[in-house]
């Protein structure tokens, strides 16, 4: 009896969590399709706001910039992160443990702090603000995610596979390409998706590091909201959320958290 | 003619000396078993020959080539791993063909050689399967086919059968021996199982604490162990208590030596037998096990074991005083 009561309470709790997480999103998505610009009911379906959004050059430009930055970030972070994971897996060196431990705090540090620190640092070393600074910042934020996902995948890799390949005459490059990479590729894809999502959804760091003229989509939305809500913001936000959730869904499936094979 | 020649090889891991000035020669076409307790350096020796470890000092010859500074991939060896290490993302045929593709063997020849190798291990029917769809014994055979398809100079096996259950292990031993004979490949294998070593090997080497203490044919090592450890490790030994040595016919000087007899060399009687060495003991237990029987006898505080055909043993009433007899030339003598 007691356990079933507990299980029941648990279910209610979970339902509440899901409700408070998704209800605002669903309302926003609904309002992006509602004819009234003042969120008035009854609901009257329209695609007007999506059409208006598609005609808004500022939004489109920001969206393209966001996607491009996210793509560049993904490529760089995935490549660097994978190399780092393989190196951490394969080689023993002084300070390896420390390095591995140091990878985690950036995930937990508030982005506001990270963003401020980066802004100061980039001015200090002369990169300043602008798209290159944004990309460097995003790569730094995304790297730990890639390393963590690829390392998780590598931890189930049997090192004897590499040894077997070498005993059969394969040089290091062939071993990497034919044996190691195929094994960790789900981890790499998942890490890449995480990197994309981290960059695409990034507000604080982008806000601090971008120049006024070329802001990313989240920054542009924030600026627009400060001037006043419009249903087109709902429209673009709905698109972003759908895209981000899709990516996260794929990433967690690829990373196979908890499961194996 | 020697194919692999290890000379004065020392290999250390930090402060552990895993191989201590090891010298050993492996003959061309032979089946060589490396035997020793856990931690004696068997794996290290095999992996040093393979090239996964570089020795601190000494030389290793494979064929007429000095390889001690050459990496694994250039040594032209075949190796089978305890976990089989089959590539999970490749079919059986692709696994077997891996070494051929790396060597850029033409496609037609590659296909032919994969087929030959699979035929040798009787797995042609499973060429398109994934390793995950195979049983333990089948994986084993794929691993073997993959290791020999490139015609390596030497085949290295580290406890190849230890992951299999007993009956499959015996089948695989026979299979392994057949394939090795058929291909004629020089084979070095590691085991801690003395029975396996005796079944498979033409020659064996016994390792202890990073040193080869004896190498020879199984017969030589069994009949003439060089020390007490070798005598006890390969087969069982009944040690003669010091106070009984007088009055026995011994093969050589008693001074600073120990003497032993193998359990199957003993006979049991109710009186000493002329012309044989005899000692008195107390029969503690007699265990009937089908064709053979094992008797435990206490001889001056030492536990002795006798193994004989059950029907050859006299019918003593359970426990009591008995005489144990053996031919003087069957006495083993090792330095104390
Ligand atoms: N990679 C390694 N790093 C450190 N010590 C090792 C390593 N491999 C083996 N050793 C040590 O070397 C000795 C011999 O080990 P090994 O060759 O594995 O023995 P065996 O195969 O006979 O059980 C052991 O003391 C072991 O702890
Ligand atoms: Mg071992």
Image: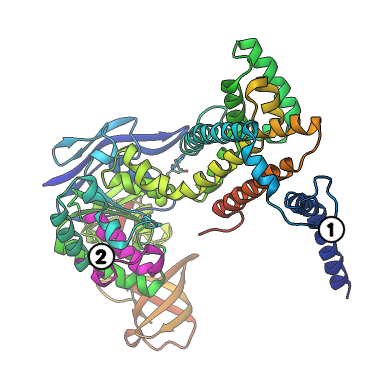
Q: Are marks 2 and 1 in contact (CB under 8 Å)?
A: no
Which residue occupies 63% across, 17% down? A129
x, y percent for residue B157: 31, 54
SS for tag 2?
helix
Q: Which mark is residue B176?
A: 2
- The quarter holding residue B129 reads bottom left
- The quarter holding residue B304 reads bottom left
Residue A47 in view of the camera: yes
Comparing B193 with B271, the one in front is B193
- The quarter holding residue A230 reads top right
Measure the C-alpha gap from mark 2 to mark 1.
Answer: 80 Å
**What's the chain of the residue with tag 2?**
B
Which residue occupies 19% across, 66% down? B120
> In front: mark 2 or mark 1?
1
Q: Main secondary structure of the magenta part?
A: helix
Q: Residues within 10 Å of mark 2 (few under 14, many from 20)?
A: some
Left or right: where does residue B148 sit relative to residue B289? left
**What's the chain of the residue with tag 1?**
A
Q: Which mark is residue A42?
A: 1
Region rendered in magenta: B120-148
- Queried whether the magenta region covers residue B142, the answer comes back as yes
Query: Which residue sits furthest left?
Result: B1
Comparing A98 with B23, the one in front is A98
- Relative to A164, does residue B175 appear above or below in the rendering? below
- Queried whether the magenta region covers residue B10, the answer comes back as no
| Labels 2 and 1 in the same subunit | no
x, y percent for residue B75: 23, 40
x, y percent for residue A57: 62, 32
């Amino acid at each position: 009896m007691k356990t079933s009561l507990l299980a029941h309470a648990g279910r209610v709790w979970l339902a509440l969590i899901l409700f408070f997480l998704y209800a605002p999103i669903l309302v926003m998505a609904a309002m992006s399709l509602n004819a009234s610009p003042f969120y008035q009911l009854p609901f009257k379906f329209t695609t007007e706001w999506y059409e208006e959004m598609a005609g808004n050059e500022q939004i489109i430009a920001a969206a393209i910039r966001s996607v491009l930055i996210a793509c560049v970030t993904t490529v760089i972070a995935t490549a660097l992160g994978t190399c780092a994971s393989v190196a951490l897996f394969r080689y023993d060196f002084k300070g390896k443990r420390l390095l591995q431990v140091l990878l985690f705090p950036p995930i937990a540090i508030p982005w506001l702090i990270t963003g401020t620190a980066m802004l100061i640092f980039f001015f200090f070393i002369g990169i300043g603000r602008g798209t290159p600074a944004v990309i460097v910042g995003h790569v730094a934020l995304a790297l730990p995610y890639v390393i963590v996902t690829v390392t998780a995948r590598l931890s189930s890799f049997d090192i004897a596979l590499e040894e077997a390949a070498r005993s059969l005459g394969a040089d290091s490059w062939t071993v990497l390409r034919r044996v190691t990479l195929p094994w960790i590729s789900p981890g790499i894809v998942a890490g890449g998706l995480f990197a994309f999502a981290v960059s695409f959804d990034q507000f604080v760091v982008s806000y601090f590091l971008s120049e006024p003229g070329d802001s990313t989509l989240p920054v542009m939305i924030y600026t627009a909201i400060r001037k006043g809500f419009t249903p087109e913001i709902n429209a673009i936000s709905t698109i972003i959320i759908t895209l981000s959730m899709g990516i996260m869904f794929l990433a967690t499936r690829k990373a196979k958290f908890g499961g194996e094979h | 003619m020697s194919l692999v020649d290890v000379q004065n090889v020392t290999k250390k891991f930090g402060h552990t000396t895993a191989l201590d000035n090891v010298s050993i020669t492996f003959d061309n076409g032979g089946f060589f078993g490396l035997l020793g307790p856990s931690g004696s350096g068997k794996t290290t020796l095999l992996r040093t020959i393979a090239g996964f470890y570089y020795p601190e000092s000494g030389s290793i010859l494979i064929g007429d080539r000095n390889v001690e500074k050459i990496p694994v991939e250039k040594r032209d060896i075949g190796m089978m791993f305890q976990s089989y290490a089959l590539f999970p993302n490749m079919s059986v045929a692709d696994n077997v063909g891996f070494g051929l593709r790396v060597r850029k063997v033409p496609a037609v020849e590659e296909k032919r050689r994969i087929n030959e190798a699979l035929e040798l291990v009787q797995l042609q029917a499973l060429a398109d399967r994934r390793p995950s769809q195979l049983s333990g014994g089948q994986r084993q055979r794929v691993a073997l086919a993959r290791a020999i398809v490139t015609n390596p100079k030497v085949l290295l096996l580290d406890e190849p059968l230890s992951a299999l259950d007993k009956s499959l292990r015996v089948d695989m031993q026979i299979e392994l021996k057949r394939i090795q004979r058929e291909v004629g490949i020089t084979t070095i294998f590691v085991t801690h199982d003395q029975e396996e070593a005796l079944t498979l090997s033409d020659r064996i080497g016994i390792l202890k604490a990073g040193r080869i203490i004896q190498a020879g044919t199984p017969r030589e090592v069994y009949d003439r162990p060089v020390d007490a450890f070798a005598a006890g490790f390969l087969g069982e030994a009944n040690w003669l208590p010091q106070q009984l040595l007088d009055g026995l016919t011994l093969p050589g000087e008693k001074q600073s030596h120990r003497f032993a007899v193998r359990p199957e060399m003993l006979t049991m009687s109710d009186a000493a037998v002329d012309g044989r060495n005899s000692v008195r003991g107390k029969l503690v237990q007699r265990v009937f096990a089908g064709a053979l029987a094992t008797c435990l006898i206490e001889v001056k505080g030492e536990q002795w074991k006798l193994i004989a055909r059950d029907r050859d043993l006299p019918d003593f009433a359970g426990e009591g005083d008995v005489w144990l007899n053996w031919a003087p030339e069957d006495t083993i003598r090792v330095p104390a």
